[in-house]
Image (spheres, rainbow, N blue to C red):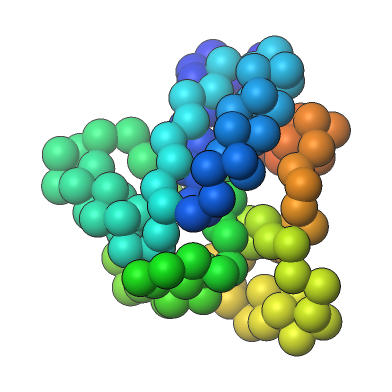
């Protein structure tokens, strides 16, 4: 187990998906603090604020593609411009079945992979264990 809490940022405009992810987080048994934002711009603002305050940044970010204001791809581009030195595990979490979306994921160095919705307890546990291995 990690010595410290895992900070998870979920960027998704669907309240049902957010609710499901919260329930999955609870069932993993890990100490996870989850913050959700309904679009990429709100998430960028949240990250900029955390950086300016010297607050702990998320260890893991799950990003939906299709959202209002700033979509997932626009978020990733804006995120890369923040110049965050400590790498954060970013994953696209989408219901998209388009091969070009899955391939586009590979074109961003900041994005570690593509996860098809719905997120499962097993998949989130794998992501947390990978974080645990990197941090130990």
In which quadrant of the rendered view does residue 83 lie? bottom left
Q: How many marks?
A: 0
Comparing 105 with 121, the one in front is 121
Residue sitting at x 62%, y 43%: 17
Comparing 105 with 69, the one in front is 69
In which quadrant of the rendered view does residue 95 lie? bottom right
Residue sitting at x 75%, y 86%: 100
Residue sitting at x 71%, y 79%: 101
- Left or right, residue 3 beside residue 39: right
Comparing 26 with 78, the one in front is 26
Please state, as top left, top right, bottom left or bottom right, where the C terminus lies in the image. top right
Kindly tell me whether residue 89 is visible in this rendering. no
Q: Is residue 134 above or below residue 90?
A: above
Residue sitting at x 35%, y 54%: 43
Comparing 67 with 76, the one in front is 67
- Left or right, residue 9 beside residue 23: left
Q: Residue 78: percent from the left, percent from the top?
A: 36, 72
Q: Residue 127: percent from the left, percent from the top?
A: 72, 40
Kindly tell me whether residue 58 is visible in this rendering. yes
Q: Residue furthest bottom?
A: 100
- Left or right, residue 118 beside residue 105: right
Q: Residue 57: percent from the left, percent from the top?
A: 37, 41
Please state, as top left, top right, bottom left or bottom right, where the N terminus lies in the image. top right
Q: Is residue 108 above or below residue 111?
A: below
């Amino acid at each position: 187990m990690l010595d410290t809490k895992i900070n998870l940022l979920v960027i998704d405009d669907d309240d049902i998906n957010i609710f499901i992810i919260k329930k999955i987080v609870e069932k993993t048994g890990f100490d996870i603090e989850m913050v959700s934002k309904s679009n990429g711009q709100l998430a960028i603002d949240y990250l900029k604020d955390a950086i300016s305050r010297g607050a702990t940044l998320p260890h893991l970010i799950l990003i939906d593609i299709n959202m209002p204001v700033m979509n997932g791809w626009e978020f990733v581009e804006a995120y890369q411009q923040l110049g965050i030195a400590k790498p954060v595990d970013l994953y696209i979490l989408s219901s998209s079945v388009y091969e070009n979306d899955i391939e586009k994921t590979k074109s961003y160095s900041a994005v570690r992979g593509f996860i098809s919705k719905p997120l499962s307890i097993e998949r989130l546990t794998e992501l947390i264990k990978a974080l645990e291995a990197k941090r130990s």
